[in-house]
Image (cartoon, rainbow, N blue to C red):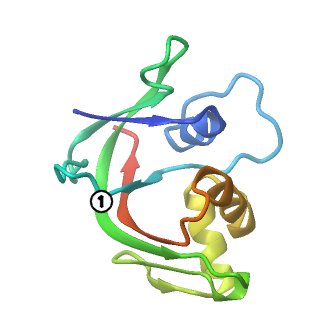
């Protein structure tokens, strides 16, 4: 079993993706069924078929289990954020090269954001100065 920890802002999108009832739903919530993670030195990430435990703040006293899922794909991913948004791109085995606004927006929605602009803003705050990223995209479905 592999565990991943998420920020509180991703709890409702993950619940929507796992078909878990949300107590006080706000406006339309994007479904999150994937996560982007840096490669690990030990190379260990979920593999297709693995059971996942998805936590909010896993090692924090207020942390909790959001839900469980089954890994359906783990593939390398590259993301390029450029000074001009129109030059941004994502490359992975599932989608190939995404460099058009509609493709980037769809990618962002699958990751729990409303669109690419929201993902881009989140990235600039969470990962300042990281304009070129190589890692792993893990996708899941309800168990």
Residue 59 image point, x, y percent: 42, 21
Relative to 24, say whether 38 is above or below: below
Relative to 75, say whether 10 is above or below: above
Q: In this view, does 80 lie to the left or right of 125?
A: left
Tally the marks: 1
Could you say which quadrant of the image residue 107 lies in? bottom right
The residue pinned by badge 1 equals 73
Name the residue located 30 percent from the left edge and 59 percent from the top edge: 73
Name the residue located 53 percent from the left edge and 44 percent from the top edge: 17
Is the C terminus in the top left, top right, bottom left or bottom right quadrant?
top left
Q: Is mark 1 on a helix, strand or loop?
A: strand
Name the residue located 71 percent from the left edge and 87 percent from the top edge: 86
Could you say which quadrant of the image residue 54 lies in? top left
Single out the residue that lies furthest toward the left: 42
Q: Is residue 104 left or right of residue 77?
A: right
Single out the residue that lies furthest toward the front: 129
Is the N terminus in the top left, top right, bottom left or bottom right quadrant?
top left
Please name whichever residue, 143 or 65, is drawn nearer the observer in this view of the structure.
65
Name the residue located 56 percent from the left edge and 35 percent from the top edge: 15
Residue 141 image point, x, y percent: 39, 47
Residue 58 image point, x, y percent: 43, 24
Residue 30 image point, x, y percent: 66, 51
Relative to 64, say whether 93 is above or below: below
Question: For the residue carrying disc 1, how many other residues have a C-alpha within 10 Å: few (<14), some (14-19), or many (20+)?
Answer: some
Single out the residue that lies furthest toward the top: 61
Q: Is residue 57 left or right of residue 82?
A: left
Relative to 39, say whether 57 is above or below: above
């Amino acid at each position: 079993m592999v565990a991943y920890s998420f920020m509180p802002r991703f709890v409702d999108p993950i619940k929507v993706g796992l078909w878990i009832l949300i107590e006080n739903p706000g406006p339309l919530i994007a479904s999150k069924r994937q996560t982007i993670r840096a490669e690990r030195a030990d190379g260990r990430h979920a593999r297709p078929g693995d059971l996942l435990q998805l936590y909010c703040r896993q090692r924090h006293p207020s942390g909790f289990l959001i839900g469980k899922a089954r890994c359906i794909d783990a593939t390398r991913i590259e993301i390029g954020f450029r000074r001009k948004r129109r030059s941004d791109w994502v490359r992975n085995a599932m989608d190939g090269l995404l460099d058009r606004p509609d493709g980037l927006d769809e990618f962002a929605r699958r990751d729990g954001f409303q669109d690419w602009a929201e993902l881009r803003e989140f990235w600039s705050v969470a990962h300042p100065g990281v304009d070129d990223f190589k890692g792993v995209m893990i996708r899941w479905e309800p168990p």
